[in-house]
Each structure stands twice: as C-alpha cells, then as structure tokens.
Amino acid sequence: MQHNKVLILDFGSQYTQLIARRVRELNIYCEIHPYNKIPSDSESFKAVILSGSPNSVRGEAVLHPNLDGIRGKKPMLAVCYGAQYLAHFSGGKVAESNTREYGRANLAFIKSDEDFFENIHEGSQVWMSHSDTIKQLPTGGVLLASTSDVENAAYKIEGEQTYAIQFHPEVYHSTDGHQLLSNFLIKIAKVEQDWTPQSFVEETVDSLKEQLGNDKVVLGLSGGVDSSVAAMLLHKAIGKNLYCIFVNNGLLRKNEFEDVLHQYEGMGLNVKGVDASARFLDALAGLSDPELKRKAIGSAFIDVFDVEANLIKDVKWLAQGTIYPDVIESVSATGGPSATIKSHHNVGGLPDYMKLKIVEPLRALFKDEVRRVGASMNMDKQLLGRHPFPGPGLAIRILGDLTAEKVRILQEVDAIFINNLRSWNLYDKVWQAGAMLLPVNSVGVMGDERTYEKCVALRAVESTDGMTADWVNLPYEFLQKTSNEIINKVKGVNRVVYDISSKPPATIEWE
C-alpha cells in the first residue's frame, strides 16, 4: 500500500522530531530529511513542513533549501525559521526582536473564516521560541493571526497553499497545536489518515516475507521494547527461520536474564539464552571512563554474538531494532544541520567479518509507535510498558570501575526501587527509573557501630521520547520507605539520595 506522505525539512530545530511525532499521531505517515537533501521522489509527498532552526535568516549561516519543486506546487507549512525564511527572501522584512520572544503567548487576533484556524479561537495559548521577528510580510502575504507582542504570528501567501507561523504547534504548550496541524494536513492538504499500527503490521510482515524468503535471520534480543517488537514482526513473517539470541552481559537487572528468557519462550520465539556475564566483567576490569566502558561492552557483545551466530548454519541476515530517531540522527550527523550528541550502537552496520545483510523492521517508527504496534499484535502489556534501559546496562549506572560486588549491590538496590514503584502503582506514571551507585563512601551509624559505606542515588523521570525529561515528584512516604528498605537490606549501602535534576541541563543517565 502506498501511503500519503508528508515531507518535513529539518533546519536543525530541537523540535523537528516532535513535529513528526505529532503528524504521526494524526495517522499520517511523514519523513524527516535534511533541508539540503530533499528526496528525489519529492513528487510522492502530498505536503511539506519546514521546521524551525537555531540559525537566523539575517546571519551569515543562512540555511537555503531548494523549494523550486515545492513552493506553490504543494501545500506547505513553514514553522518559525521557515516562516522567517519565506518572509526575508520573498519581499518581506525580518529584524531582531526588541525582546526575545520565548515561552507562552496567546493569540489576540485570528482572521475569520480561515480553514487554517478552524476551531481555534482568540486567547488560544501558543509557544514562541525565537529572537528574530517578521516586521513585514512577504509579497502576497496575508495576516492570519497575532499575539499581543507579535503582530505577524501567522500568515499565508495569496494564490498558494503556503502557510507560515512564528510559533511551535508541535509542543505541548501550544494548546491547539494538534488542531492546527490537523487543519493544515487534513482540511487544506487533503492528506488521508491511513498510517495505523494495524496497517504497519500487515504491510511490514508482507514486505519481510518478500525480502527474506526462506533465508535465516539472527536477532540479538535485549529484553527491551524495540528488539521484542522487531522479533514478533519477524516471527510472524518467517517463523522458525528467526533465531533469537539473548545475551546475559552480567549487567542486567536482578533476575532479568531468567525472567525475560522465560517470557520470550512463552511468546513462541525461537530463542537461545547465553550467559556471558563473566566475560563482560573481565573486559570491564579496571575501566572507569564511561566511553571506554561502552566500547568494551560493545566489543565483547560482538565477539559473543559472532560466535553464536556462526553456530547457526547458513544464516544470511542480522535483524536490528533500529528505530526512526536513530536513523534521523545518523543522517543529520553526515548531511543535516542537527548536531549528534552520541552515536548509536545499532546504526552503521557490523564489523566486515560478520558478512550479514541487515534487516530493520522498525526503522520507520518512533518509540511510542513501536509500543502501539506491539499492542496491536497483543504482546504482553508489562513487556511493552517496560522502562527504557541503557544498552550498556548497569555499567553506566556504576560510576567508576566495576566489580562483581558493585554489580550485586546495585542490582539489589534497583530491585527494591523498581518493585516498590510497581507496588505503589507508580511504575507506569514514570518514563524511566533506576539507581546509580556513586563512587563515594559516606559515614553512617548502624546500631552502635560507625560505618563507612556506599551512597546510591535514585532517579525517576517523566518524558515522552528521552530528548527532554523532568524529575518525578515521588511521594515522600514512598521515598522514605524505599530508602529505609535499601539501607536495611542491602549490605554495603548506608545512604540514599534522590536526583532532582531535569534534562537539560542534566542527562537521564549519569554516564
């Protein structure tokens, strides 16, 4: 089935992925491409959205897209930088704002009888984020909306299906952003809403059958949502020709290897569990630098996985749980304006000696879509609702060097924290939670004795995609009980702290 597609041109905004997620929530398929790498098949897109950008249209580092095949030929929505770009280079004027226009604002004027603002009323809250402002509309520009501080908050171009706004409809703080995107895409651009979890499963399974035929495929399961959903899609397509390998790197949560392995077998997957925990701990011995720990874990995993994959006769494909944000960031790092903060272990292929072709069933999906696809296949709710867990596991939650004893301590602490979140019905209200073992000892008193033992930090955050996150205000009673239980039950810990930093400026993990 050929879906109606929406093209999003990325000018480096921190919100570009959020635009795509909002479009997908309308059951409309969209793709993000760098502004300077417009797809050759642009004719197949029914509408185009220009993202915001940290750049200025008045500066030397102006990002110039080639809109020859788009403007005036397809419905186009220009957001912030896009709106200013159209104004500045089409007869209008953009100047520096007297004050930085950032944060909440309200629409004070909306032009009547405009499809673009249907069911949106004066007073609607929008989110501004720019230091330049449009002083004069471009040639053919028609004012559609203003705030008390920003006269040209929205406009359209006469004779075109081109719309432009100086606020972000994709963020939560723009209360009618969903309606605005719906008006543009469905009412104006006439894009059909045919991108659903069910349609994705059907089309992906058919495509995998055609792509793989009778070939054998090997997949490294992690226990997480992405690899599990990828496994089920492949299982539907090729059945026993899918060989799953679940490696215990010794850095999983307490009892996780046995529990998850049992769960996978209950799903009918052809899965082999490999306990290589001693090998990983040996590879990590004496390493304190976070990047060196990541590299050691990655190298050990490839070695273990390679041995296991070679035991499968005539395997031709490696399946990976790569999802769309991984793909976008990898593309942006080489061709687009967005800076990549860290590399992704599952994008970019394998060492040459493994000689396997790669299949990635989820590379078109965002994380929340992966969960919806899993739910449409009736996968276990607890598995789909699992918090994200870092690939290097507890290695990056143990600050400093690793030992088997430190892993034991953190596994025990983490188990108490996570189990209490579940028993207090808080687990599903948290996006990600975990404990960190800090590289400090602190003085304590237990009974009549003075102790000098480890300190652990508990962390729980709310987020939608991990790009930004707020710490969760867990009840004091919960923290009190959890702290007491950890200190009383986990030998080697005498102090518990709770991390109340948000991302940014902090990250979710400590390393």
Image: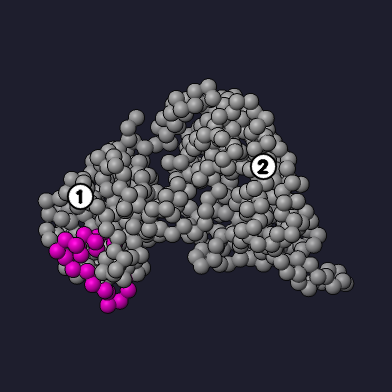
Find residue 499 and report its image quarter.
bottom right
Identify the disc placed on residue 303: 2
Check the image and report above or below for 160 versus 152. Answer: above
Disc nearer the start of the sequence (2/1): 1
Q: Where does the magenta region start and end?
A: 81-101
Name, please, the residue furthest toward the top.
214
Residue at 42% in and 50% down = 331
Q: Nearer the viewer, residue 365 or 148?
A: 365
Would residue 74 be seen by someone viewing this image from the given angle? yes
Mark 2 to mark 1 CA distance (whole Å): 50 Å
93 in magenta? yes
Specify how the rendered protein is coloured. one colour
Would residue 148 be seen by someone viewing this image from the given angle? no
In this rendering, the count of numbered labels is: 2
Query: Label 2: how many residues lie within 10 Å, few (<14), some (14-19) or many (20+)?
Result: few
Q: Position of residue 453 (x, y in %)?
A: 79, 67
Closer mark to the observer between disc 2 and disc 1: 2
Q: Which residue is mark 1?
A: 68
Mark 2 secondary-structure assignment: helix
Residue type indicated by callout 1? Asp
Residue at 48% in and 53% down = 465
- Relative to residue 220, is residue 111 drawn left or right? left
Find residue 333 and report its image quarter.
bottom left
Identify the disc placed on residue 233: none
Mark 1 secondary-structure assignment: loop
Name, please, the residue furthest toward the bottom.
98
Q: Nearer the viewer, residue 364 or 460?
A: 364
